[in-house]
Image (cartoon, rainbow, N blue to C red):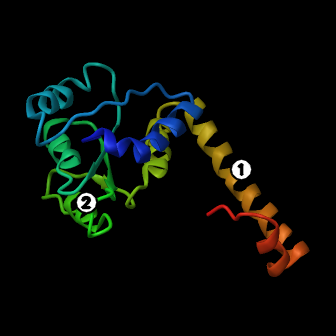
Amino acid sequence: MGSDSDLWVMKEAAEILDSFGVTNEVKIVSAHRTVKKMIYYAKTAKTRGIQVIIAGAGGAAHLPGMVAAITPLPVIGVPIMGTSSRLHGLDSLLSIVQMPPGVPVATLAVNGARNAGIFACQILGLKNRAIAAKVERYKQNLEGDVLRRAARLDRLGIKKLLKSTTLIR
């Protein structure tokens, strides 16, 4: 991520990776303020055993694209809506998604670090059956959660359900 202010979003990617048993590292590497560190990180990532990079950035959001320009690894970009963003993350989204031909970045939703972690696991699962099985179980659990919530709504009705709990989005 470009700054520690992005950690509140990017921690969700780390949590997902941890829950799937995927070794990961969390680093602050700014495309604008630590250019040499960013270049070194991107150039050495593959030789250090990294297989996928998740890069989160707010504002001008150059980190994912710059890293993708330097490394042959897949890069997943997470646009981050900063606290001072007047554009609510749209600036970051457009900066990451508008990459030139030959420099792809898989761009996810604004603040979509959780999905970035899942997508990274899906990529890794192509060659690792254990990770693939965990992704399948995770998705089955999502289905079960929705079915339980739907049954609760059917049982209680909308008014009682809204009074009884804080709904999870």
Residue that appears at 71% across and 63% down: 166
Q: Residues within 10 Å of mark 2 (few under 14, many from 20)?
A: many
Q: Residue furthest right?
A: 155
Residue that appears at 33% across and 59% down: 81
Marks 2/1: CA–CA distance: 31 Å
Report the mark closest to the observer, 2 or 1: 2
Going by the numbered disc 2, the residue's amino acid type is: Ser
Q: Position of residue 46 (x, y in %)?
A: 26, 26
Residue hosting label 1: 141
Please say if 77 is above or below 43: below
Going by the numbered disc 1, the residue's amino acid type is: Asn
Instruction: Give the side of residue 120 with respect to residue 132, left or right.
Output: left
Please say if 151 is above or below 134: below
Residue that appears at 19% across and 60% down: 95
Q: Residues within 10 Å of mark 1 (few under 14, many from 20)?
A: few
Q: Are marks 2 and 1 in contact (CB under 8 Å)?
A: no
Residue hosting label 2: 92
Q: Position of residue 10 (x, y in %)?
A: 41, 43
In the structure shown, which secondary structural element does the residue marked by tag 2 occupy? helix
